[in-house]
Image: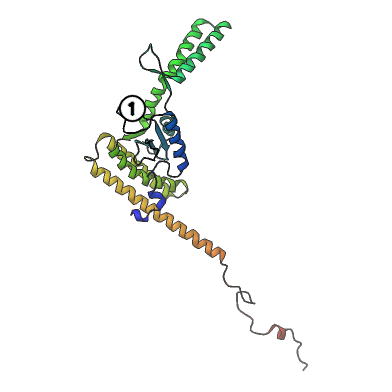
């Protein structure tokens, strides 16, 4: 069935940013300048700089190899819940944001967010300014302490709430399998986005549910024990992609045939309009009658 799919459909996500190669060059150059790339010296303690590629169904997370070449397998795949609301889709943007910059504090174990340190300084200056203008201390002091605490701990709370609407899969084996299903779902989602036909939109919804189920199986089980269920969902998604490809092909053929009929009006009509032609000569009908 894959032979019936368009070549652009099967090429999705084989490399990062397939539809925008310039984006990968930009992101990889940024990582090479500012971050830690993935090479043979990496260990489990290394914090790699990740590049997120957002899609209609979720995202793919890529690492940057040391030679700058595009990777073949994603580092992580996130799948958004089916029939997600607009608020739930914000979770996708929140979880794929760039990681916060942190600064190490010698007197305190761990590190501190740069944003929290900046907000602490701003709140201190604002509190002193408010005290000079007559604001009570019991009002200004809690605000000065609460602002940096919220900036430090609130993002972690939001991360936990956002993960409730997303299933994330990691590992080369699991990501390699889910990548194949994600290619088909990208094709379904793009076909539904450019059309108002119910068949295309319904296929994208069903495909999203199958991708969500596959991500759940890979979260709780390994690929060997869940192989039968995974193969069944991949076959169903492939059948949906085959049906959508046939619909798009027939639609393109119908539009081409309609354009050809509009451009070819047919042979010109004869000297008489459609209908019964006169049986006598028009000149004879207006000739004067002969005298008796």
Position of 21 relative to 136 (above/below): below
Please tell me whether mark 1 sits on a helix, a strand or a loop. Answer: loop
Position of 110 relative to 33 (above/below): above
Identify the residue shown where x is 45% and y is 57%: 251
**Left or right of 111, for residue 218:** left
As drawn, which residue projects farthest toward the left? 225
Which residue is label 1 attached to? 46
Position of 39 relative to 206 (above/below): above
Question: Looking at the picture, how far across and down is residue 138, in whole percent?
Answer: 49, 6
**Left or right of 20, for residue 242:** left
Question: Looking at the picture, how far across and down is residue 197, in whole percent?
Answer: 45, 50
* Quarter-of-image position of residue 78: top left
Q: How many marks?
A: 1
Identify the residue shown where x is 39% and y is 43%: 15
Question: Looking at the picture, how far across and down is residue 102, in whole percent?
Answer: 42, 21
Label 1 CA crowd tier, 10 Å (few <14, some 14–19, many 20+) = few
Position of 274 relative to 130 (above/below): below
Q: Nearer the viewer, residue 40 or 115?
A: 40
**Left or right of 125, for residue 107:** left
Identify the residue shown where x is 31% and y is 26%: 45
Question: Looking at the picture, how far across and down is residue 109, in whole percent?
Answer: 35, 14
């Amino acid at each position: 069935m894959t032979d019936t799919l368009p070549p652009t459909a099967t090429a999705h996500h084989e490399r990062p940013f397939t539809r925008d190669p310039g984006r990968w060059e930009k992101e990889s150059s940024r990582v090479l300048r500012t971050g830690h790339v993935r090479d043979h010296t990496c260990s489990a303690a290394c914090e790699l700089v990740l590049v997120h590629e957002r899609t209609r169904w979720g995202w793919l997370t890529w690492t940057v190899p040391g030679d700058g070449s595009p990777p073949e397998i994603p580092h992580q795949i996130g799948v958004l819940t089916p029939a997600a609301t607009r608020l739930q889709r914000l979770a996708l943007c929140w979880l794929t944001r760039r990681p916060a910059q942190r600064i190490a504090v010698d007197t305190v174990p761990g590190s501190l967010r740069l944003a929290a340190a900046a907000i602490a300084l701003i709140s201190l200056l604002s509190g002193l300014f408010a005290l000079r203008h007559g604001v009570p201390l019991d009002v200004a002091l809690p605000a000065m302490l609460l602002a940096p605490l919220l900036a430090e701990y609130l993002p972690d709370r939001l991360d936990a709430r956002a993960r409730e609407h997303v299933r994330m899969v990691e590992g080369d084996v699991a990501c390699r399998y889910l990548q194949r299903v994600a290619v088909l779902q990208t094709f379904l989602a793009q076909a539904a986005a450019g059309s108002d036909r119910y068949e295309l939109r319904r296929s994208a919804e069903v495909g999203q549910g199958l991708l969500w189920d596959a991500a759940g199986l890979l979260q709780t089980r390994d690929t060997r024990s869940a192989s039968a269920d995974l193969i069944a969902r991949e076959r169903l998604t492939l059948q949906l992609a085959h049906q959508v490809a046939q619909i798009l092909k027939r639609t393109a053929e119908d539009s081409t045939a309609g354009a050809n009929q509009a451009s070819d009006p047919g042979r010109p009509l004869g000297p008489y309009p459609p209908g019964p032609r006169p049986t006598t000569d028009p000149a004879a009908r207006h000739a004067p009658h002969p005298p008796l």
